[in-house]
Amino acid sequence: MPVPFYILCGSLGAGKTTLLMRLLEHWKAEGRRVGVLMNEAGAISIDGPRAGTLAEQVMNLAGGCVCCDTKEDLSWGIAQLVRDYESDVLILECSGLADPAEVVDAVTDLYTARLASLERIIALLHPVSAEASHSSAYVTAQAIRCADELILNKRDLYVPGHWERFKADILAQNSFARLWETSHARLDPSALLAPRHTAARSMPTNVVFGGSRTTEHRTRASYHPIATTVRLPGPLDRDRFLAWSRALPTELERAKGFFRFAGGPELQEFQYAPPGEPAIAPVMLLDEPEPAVVLIGRGYDVDACAAGLLACADPSTGPERSE
Ligand SMILES: Nc1nc2c(ncn2[C@@H]2O[C@H](COP(=O)(O)OP(=O)(O)OP(=O)(O)O)[C@@H](O)[C@H]2O)c(=O)[nH]1
């Protein structure tokens, strides 16, 4: 029997990992063996170590976008999770850069479909201001189009009028899906995951293939924001980092990472997902992550932003950066 396979997709920073953690808790309480596939934009996995605290097995497809770079890795990862780790439920968190229609294409090939059956596509969206016409807009539109479940997250950032327009715009793009409105992705996982269709199906009914198949393997699609991984040579100066984080360019669509502050033993997690403010909080993880910050966006001065970040570190250690 193929194991159920869930896809989490949606906009950058909308709350996919927040929901993933809730689903992992739910499955863990049920005694399920969950295999997580993480596809992250940067060269270093930031969300993987978080998921690793709850999942049976986490496989990272970091270093790119699952639709362009790692399609084969995805099929291989599914096979490994099902065969070697005996996962009985699988979930893939797509980076906010991956075209979910391409991902569906990859997981519904004949070989992979024997191991895993696509159960549900869950898209997370958040109310980013309409003026910010982000380069990830195409990917968000694809996620909306493909979704079986549309979760409008960050309801706590409700602005009268804006939220209603955001919702109407999404409903206009997909009237098949169920709609959820949440804060911090708080919802009843049993209700979200309960079977909705009696007949087995190999792919969602509302996915249309063909039009989106123009991306070639190993070629970065032009609509993708660029992910830049800034590896940090050591602890950061708190004041300098705070100053840097307060002056982030408006074109930056997402930033996240782990590091320590000089003189502080705790590992810090940095999160920036506009329209929210940059946030830094101590975090406990099972595995020590590599200190790094991933910057995602297009049309801003990447070098200046990365240099500003590196200038927050101890100047005696050398900078390193990879795309
Ligand atoms: N205010 C507010 N913040 C939220 C909410 N949900 C998530 N966040 C915060 O938004 C940031 C991004 O959340 P994630 O769950 O990492 O988002 P993501 O979609 O996994 O991000 P990417 O994988 O980078 O695309 C984190 O700082 C969260 O704590 C919410 O409902 N309201």
Image (cartoon, helix red, strand yellow):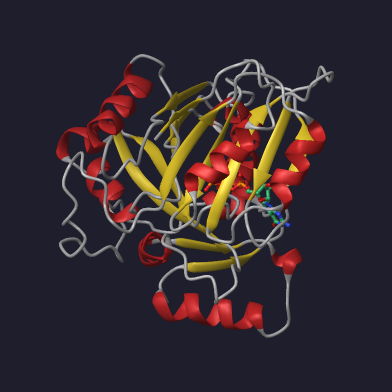
x, y percentage for residue 261?
77, 25
Give the quarter of the image for residue 25.
top right
Residue at the extreme front: 316
Looking at the image, which residue is at 17% across and 33% down? 111
Q: Is residue 163 left or right of residue 167?
A: right
| Relative depth, front residue between 59 and 147 | 59
Quadrant location of the N terminus?
Answer: top left
**Where does residue 306 sit, x and y in percent of width and height?**
55, 39
> Residue 116: image x %, image y %?
31, 35
- Residue found 59% across the figure and 61% down from its top: 250
Relative to the observer, which residue lies in front, 33 or 300? 300
Q: Can you give x and y, in whole percent of width and height, for residue 212 in the image?
A: 21, 60
Quadrant that contains the C terminus: top left
User: Is 198 drawn above or below residue 16 in the view shown?
Assistant: below
Question: Residue at image x 76%, y 37%?
Answer: 240
Give residue 18's quadrant in the image.
top right
Say which of 193 and 66 sits in front.
66
Side (left or right) of 247 relative to 73: right
Q: Is residue 301 above or below residue 251?
A: above
Is residue 93 in view? no
Residue 197 in view in this figure? yes
